[in-house]
Amino acid sequence: MEIVNRVSRMAAIANKNLVTDVKTGLVPTSGAIHTGDLSLIRAARRMADLAVVSIFVNRLEFPGDREYEQYPRDITADVDLLRTENVDYVFIPQDDEMYPASFSTHVEVRKAGEAAGLPSALFSGMATGALKLLHLTKPSYVFYGEQDAVQAAILRRMIRDLNISAEVVVAPAGREPSGLSCSGRNRLLGEPQKAAAVVFHRCLRAAEDAIGGGETHAKKILAEMDRIFGEQPLVRLEYAVIIDPELLEPVSKIQGGVIVGVGGRIGDTFLTDAVSIDVGRLSPAGGRQ
Amino acid sequence: MEIVNRVSRMAAIANKNLVTDVKTGLVPTSGAIHTGDLSLIRAARRMADLAVVSIFVNRLEFPGDREYEQYPRDITADVDLLRTENVDYVFIPQDDEMYPASFSTHVEVRKAGEAAGLPSALFSGMATGALKLLHLTKPSYVFYGEQDAVQAAILRRMIRDLNISAEVVVAPAGREPSGLSCSGRNRLLGEPQKAAAVVFHRCLRAAEDAIGGGETHAKKILAEMDRIFGEQPLVRLEYAVIIDPELLEPVSKIQGGVIVGVGGRIGDTFLTDAVSIDVGRLSPAGGRQ
């Protein structure tokens, strides 16, 4: 396993792999590697010739310096864990090499995202950082957990719009026993906040149950999700959407596959969660078969 | 020479060339191929293993449908001309394949560009279209004429910021005898407008002469350029800048290389022009050695 810190070294490795037709699987992480990440890494090793795991806390995704600085980092433990997973390259770029003072370029997935009720500016930093990682590692596949299905749908739309040669693969989410999706950001929550954060998952389960029970009107499901969030004053909801996983556009009548996604803040901490629901695969009584 | 219309075919060719380590030179054009384009094509054939010329009128660069529809197109004559130049691939994508109804992604080069006084939104469509062409043709080199040096600097900034493996090469401008830079857009101008448009070049020559004469204060040169534009009421100036060619940032004291760029509208037609000036290569009496 090679630890790559320099951007130029990563680009050279990626170019060499392209020329020798070695297919790369990229698992982008913010560090604080969790069980969900490990299942993505295993998927990458199955589908691609080699696995690159990036550890990068993307400053552009934070509203301010304080939140960025406070984000939990534990590179040593992460690297130890990745060694046991036969990862080929761990890419740990430095912030000032990724975003030098002169950095000026931003990508936004506007039209479809806004139609779906997603605050596109909120995801611009995520998309910009992800686009850089795609160029630096040139993967055939890039892996996201199901809890990040909205982000994955935004990137799938970006990849299609910009004609990038990479496929987004969404694998099952890592979740804590409470249902809370695994994220480094969870470490920033106090106990009452962590208990409150379970509302994201509860709300997604309610949507899943409603769709499994035969409800096809997105509006009704979103209203019920809103009601559930209303009961949890610690969470400021920023979006709740039901979207087409390919087009990223809002779905009004549910049939086939949809992503139900939610995002909001508890204090300064921005949390998101999502489930992918394939109506054909749900039993009439709700829940997955 | 293969004419490629389908986006998927172009991507397949580019991927095959990457895997076989064949270096591509891309000359992006809007068609109505002129002598400036031909010198870029010759540079591409010298520097790269094969030359791809794209002919694509990028809808995102136009303020409205009418201006887009009116843009001169002459694919048959262009293709005939390119056959005589030993071009390997002519990529002529269809608008609805490049920008389907669901297209949602935009890239902007904001911070540095705005600091320099460039209206970044104006160039967002150009950058987005160019990024798509880079992904579709995967060139080692992409060629622009000196008259497009501002656009080239924006793309160089984008390429660096986003870690794209391509190098921007700027080659001498194609100019009409009056000094007007060659562009398909010139065909949209009536005779009085065409005469007025020479002000862009006159203004750049004035900057070149001032710098050659030892002037180092960008502010003074920009004031003189403003004055020259003020004498030509048919032109609405949108920007006049003196920027660092690598960083795209505004230059206050001129030393080493700079780009002097201007852009404005005559009627609905948006025209730009630029010169690259290397102070070390100018004689004290002005003009190039």
Image (spheres, coloured by chain):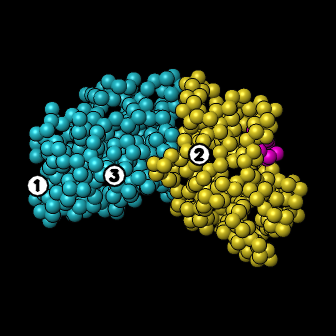
Chain colours: A yellow, B cyan
Q: Is residue A47 above or below residue A247?
A: above
Quadrant containing the C terminus of chain A is bottom right
Quadrant containing the N terminus of chain A is top right
Main secondary structure type of the part rendered in magenta: helix
Please tell me whether mark 3 or mark 1 is closer to you in this view.
3
Give SS at disc 2.
helix
Q: Which residues are magenta?
A: A33-42
Which residue is label 2 attached to?
A95
- Identify the image quadrant of residue B4: top left
Q: Is residue B71 left or right of residue A162?
A: left
Q: Amino acid at mark 3?
A: Pro
Read off the chain for label 3: B
State the residue in front, B246 or B37: B246
- Identify the image quadrant of residue B157: top left
Read off the chain for label 1: B
Residue B44: percent from left, percent from top? 33, 29
Is the same chain shared between marks 1 and 2?
Answer: no
Residue in the picture at 55% in, 44% down: A96
Q: Is residue A121 left or right of residue B27?
A: right
Q: Earlier in the sequence, mark 3 or mark 1?
A: 1
Q: Is residue A262 left or right of residue B234?
A: right
- Give the distance between the C-alpha atoms of the residues marked 1 and 2, in whole angstroms: 51 Å
As for residue B36 lying within the magenta part, the answer is no
- Give the distance between the C-alpha atoms of the residues marked 2 and 3, in whole angstroms: 25 Å
- Give the distance between the C-alpha atoms of the residues marked 3 and 1, in whole angstroms: 30 Å
- Identify the image quadrant of residue B172: top left
State the residue in front, B34 or A12: A12
Is the same chain shared between marks 3 and 1?
Answer: yes
Q: Amino acid at mark 1?
A: Ala
User: Could you say which disc has been placed on residue B195 in the image?
Assistant: 1
Which residue is label 3 attached to?
B250
**Tag 2 near tag 3, CB within 8 Å:** no
